[in-house]
Image (cartoon, helix red, strand yellow):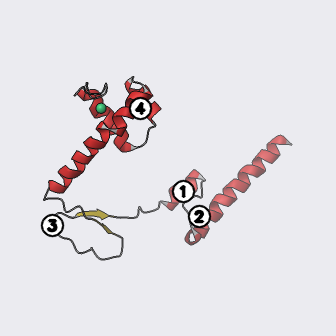
């Protein structure tokens, strides 16, 4: 069975499969990136890549160390009931550095609990507008 133009080069096939798997690029973008044509990538994507992906999924199921369950632990909530082979995603909120946000002058990320900081940013903005007004007069 003759291999497609992508599969005839194992390294190229691996790169293309990786890009197709990410789903971030169009067929044309992948073709441009690897120096191939959109139709070659399309043929490879609709046949070889699907087989490659199916093999990966089968391989994953055969791996007994991986239960395939992904559990999430949220802040202030108990750890979910884990079984061997489960994957646990731990969510932690980043501590907000309010002083750094005020210095940046960008109030995005501040909430009603940061009224003082929002006020400080607003005053700084007013002062800046005032100084620009004075400069233009
Ligand atoms: Zn192929």
The vertical placement of 27 against 94, above or below, is above
Element type at mark 2: helix
Mark nearer the viewer, 4 or 3? 4
For the point 22% across and 28% down, which residue is it?
1
Q: Which residue is mark 2?
A: 117
Q: Is mark 2 within 8 Å of ligand 1?
A: no
Mark earlier in primary sequence (4, 3)? 4
Mark earlier in primary sequence (2, 4)? 4
Mark earlier in primary sequence (2, 1)? 1
* Mark 2 and mark 1: Cα distance apart in space: 8 Å
Does residue 116 appear left or right of residue 126 in this picture? left
The vertical placement of 18 against 72, above or below, is above
The answer to whether the residue labelled 2 contacts the one labelled 1, judged by CB atoms less than 8 Å apart, is yes
> What is the x, y in percent for residue 62?
15, 55
Mark nearer the viewer, 2 or 3? 3
Mark earlier in primary sequence (2, 3)? 3
Residue nearer the viewer, 20 or 70 = 20
Q: Which residue is mark 1?
A: 101
Mark earlier in primary sequence (1, 4)? 4
For the point 23% across and 61% down, which residue is it?
68
* Mark 1 and mark 4: Cα distance apart in space: 39 Å
Q: Which residue is mark 4?
A: 30
- The part of the image, by quadrant, that contains residue 125 is bottom right
Mark nearer the viewer, 2 or 4? 4
Q: Which residue is mark 3?
A: 84
For the point 57% across and 67% down, which residue is it?
111
């Amino acid at each position: 069975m003759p291999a497609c133009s992508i599969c005839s080069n194992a390294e190229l096939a691996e790169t293309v499969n990786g890009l197709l798997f990410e789903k971030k690029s169009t067929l044309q973008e992948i073709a441009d990136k690897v120096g191939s044509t959109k139709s070659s990538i399309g043929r490879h994507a609709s046949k070889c890549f699907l087989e490659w992906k199916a093999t990966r999924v089968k391989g994953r199921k055969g791996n007994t160390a991986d239960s395939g369950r992904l559990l999430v632990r949220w802040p202030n909530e108990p750890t979910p009931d884990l079984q061997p082979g489960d994957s646990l995603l731990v969510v932690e909120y980043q501590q907000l550095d309010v002083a750094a946000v005020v210095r940046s002058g960008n109030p995005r990320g501040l909430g009603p609990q940061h009224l003082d900081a929002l006020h400080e940013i607003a005053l700084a903005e007013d002062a800046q507008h005032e100084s620009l007004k004075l400069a233009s007069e």
